[in-house]
């Protein structure tokens, strides 16, 4: 799966933004948001957060917070890395 496979929908809490969520069998996933008023987005960049069981997760080796200004290539790389995280017991 790559950035191009993401399906963006209107953001549930920010009507001027859009969000795509992808989850993996290991319980982890990503929230990818965009929009001209989103805090950490710029032209053609996205704000990404790691999820665990659909909740924000700041305790992975990949991120200890929201990752701003991510390009589509960055998002694809994060998708691959998140899909390979070990499941939390």
Image (cartoon, helix red, strand yellow):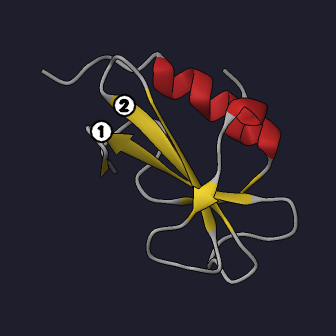
Label 2 secondary element: strand
Quadrant housing residue 65: bottom left
- In the image, 52: left or right of 4? left
Question: Where residue 50 appears, x then y in whole percent?
Answer: 44, 44
Q: Which mark is residue 18?
A: none
Question: Where residue 68 appears, x then y in whole percent?
Answer: 64, 62
64, 16: nearer the viewer: 16
**Image vertical order of residue 80 relative to residue 39, above or below:** above
Q: Quadrant of the C terminus?
A: top left
Q: Residue at x 64, y 72 (%)?
A: 17
Cα separation, mark 2 vs mark 1, equals 4 Å
Q: Residue at x 76, y 79 (%)?
A: 36
Q: Which residue is mark 2?
A: 28
72, 62: nearer the viewer: 72
- In the image, 35: left or right of 64? right
Q: Which residue is mark 1?
A: 52
Q: Residue at x 42, y 23 (%)?
A: 24
Outermost residue, left side: 89
Sequence-wise first label, 2 or 1: 2
**Image vertical order of residue 36 relative to residue 34, above or below:** below
Characterize the local packing of mark 1: few (<14), some (14-19) or many (20 or more) Cα atoms within 10 angstroms: many
- In the image, 69: left or right of 28? right
The answer to whether the residues at label 2 and label 1 have Cβ atoms under 8 Å apart is yes
Label 1 secondary element: strand
Q: Quadrant of the N terminus?
A: top right
**Image vertical order of residue 10 relative to residue 25, above or below:** below
Outermost residue, bottom side: 37
76, 9: nearer the viewer: 9
73, 37: nearer the viewer: 37
Question: Where residue 66 appears, x then y in whole percent?
Answer: 49, 60
């Amino acid at each position: 799966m790559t950035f191009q496979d993401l399906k963006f929908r209107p953001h549930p809490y920010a009507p001027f933004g859009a969000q795509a969520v992808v989850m993996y069998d290991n319980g982890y996933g990503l929230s990818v948001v965009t929009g001209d008023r989103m805090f950490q987005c710029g032209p053609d960049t996205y704000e990404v957060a790691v999820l665990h069981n659909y909740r924000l997760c700041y305790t992975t080796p990949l991120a200890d917070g929201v990752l701003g200004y991510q390009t589509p290539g960055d998002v694809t790389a994060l998708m691959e890395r998140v899909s390979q995280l070990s499941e939390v017991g």
